Image: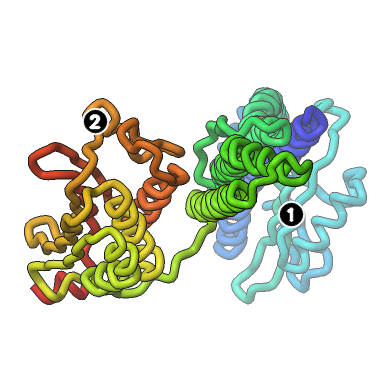
Amino acid sequence: MRHIFVRVLVYFGVVIVVFTLLIGLLFTRFNTNNIVGTYRTQLSDLAKTIATRTSKANQINDTEGYREYMSAMEDFGSARQTEIWIFSNPDAQKPLDDSYTNVATDQLDISDQMKEILDKAFKGKTGTFISHDSIYDADMMHVAKPIFDNNKNVIGAVVVTGPMKMRNQAVNQYQKYMLFCVTVGGILAIILALIFSRQIVRPIIRIDQFAKEIAAGDYMGTTGIVRRDELGTLADSMDELAEQLVEAETYREGVEQTRRDFFSNVSHELRTPITVTKGYADSLAEGFVDDPAKREDYLKRIQDECVTMDRLVSDLLILSRMQNPDFEMNIEVINLIAVAQDAMRGLRILMKEKGLHGEVTYDDEMSLIDGDYDRIRQVFVVLMQNAIKYCDPNTDIKVHISRNIDDSTITAEVSDRGIIIPDEEIDQVFEKFYRASTHGGREGSGLGLVVAKNIVERHGGKISVSSDEENGTIFKIIFPQTSENILDL
């Protein structure tokens, strides 16, 4: 990441420094042209004024007044170190009278540049140039303006020469000031480039560190970057990725724990029936049992243990599937009354063998919920089978379904008269492999109520139990009503 920081710093620095230098050079050039241009305009205006006065004096032949005017102008020019030369145009039909000139071209050693601006002036144009004057040892600006007669013919020219010393000083001073500004600007540019580079690179470094943390398996942190730009969006994506990885890890751990629990439960619960079955089988195989009645009893016990193992494995598989987050149910609108009646019909034979009477009652025929028919039926089957196992002979097993308008729920109660669950064991009823201490020798895997509880909770419901001598044992299930049922209220 250091390489990125250096590269960004260099890019920022180069761009800002080049921009600062360019602006400085442009402003220096503009100011220089402005100072020189302003002075050129001043000399040009002076030359134009003298040319106009000379032309007028020549027309009215005002030699006396003109001399006084020029005397004053020369004094003015001397004070400002400005020279005024008036030339006659030798090529004109009526050149400017010598009375109004103060220099002749054939009397001076005129430079080529001076000749060039004089030629421009004699052609009616303004000529100007800057040169170094050895007499004054300074740069001088020369401006030539034409002198016209009444017919707009060029009869002469005025050349005004002024020193550039003060202007050059002003330009030099401005250049020094601009150099100072550019230097300071360059330093500030480097500092700003350093700050901006850190602002850009720091989030990238943090995102890189966070990515390494994720790669190392640490998904609990965040980038801690709050920005409203592309880097902020990238940081948010990384944070979201971490959250999803946490969820995925939690899911994976849940699946792994379910798998471990399943194998642990299977190995633990199957150990006893397998041991018993093996003991009976070994006894039969080794010929220790000669009595046919006893052999038949052993075979019956082996068969019973196999049935127990089959039921146990089946319950474990169902429970394992229910605890898997990916387990999907076939949700549809079902009538809880019809499901309870269907479950009771399936258990009529078992109830008849024990002399039990079953009854499903309800308050409202429209007791609809959103649920998986087979799973809800399985809940009723588990509760009714428990009732058949533990209730007294020739008693009633009742299922009552009521509709609660206040909280938009459907309640189903399965009750029986028989063995009471001790108060100290009520909280353990829905734990795996729980069997009440009062159940005697009755068979069971201890998983039925756990399966029922998982099914109810997957439907957004709740299940509870109460047991006493007065009311018997009552399992209460509460389901949320379907929206169709609520609209019917």
Q: Residue at x 8, y 72 (%)?
A: 489
- Rounded to the nearest whole Å, what is the CA distance between mark 2 and mark 1? 144 Å
Report which residue position mark 1 lands on: 98
Nearest to N terminus: mark 2 or mark 1: 1
Q: Is residue 116 left or right of residue 209?
A: right
Give the tally of numbered discs.
2
Three-letter amino acid code at disc 2? Pro
**Residue 74 position (above or below residue 230):** above
Q: Is residue 98 left or right of residue 376?
A: right
Quadrant in the rendering for residue 123: bottom right
Residue 405 seen anywhere in this rendered image of the structure: yes
The residue closer to the viewer here, 310 or 455, is 310
What x and y, as percent, mark residue 186? 70, 28
Three-letter amino acid code at disc 1? Asp
**Residue 479 position (above or below residue 258):** below
Residue 167 seen anywhere in this rendered image of the structure: no
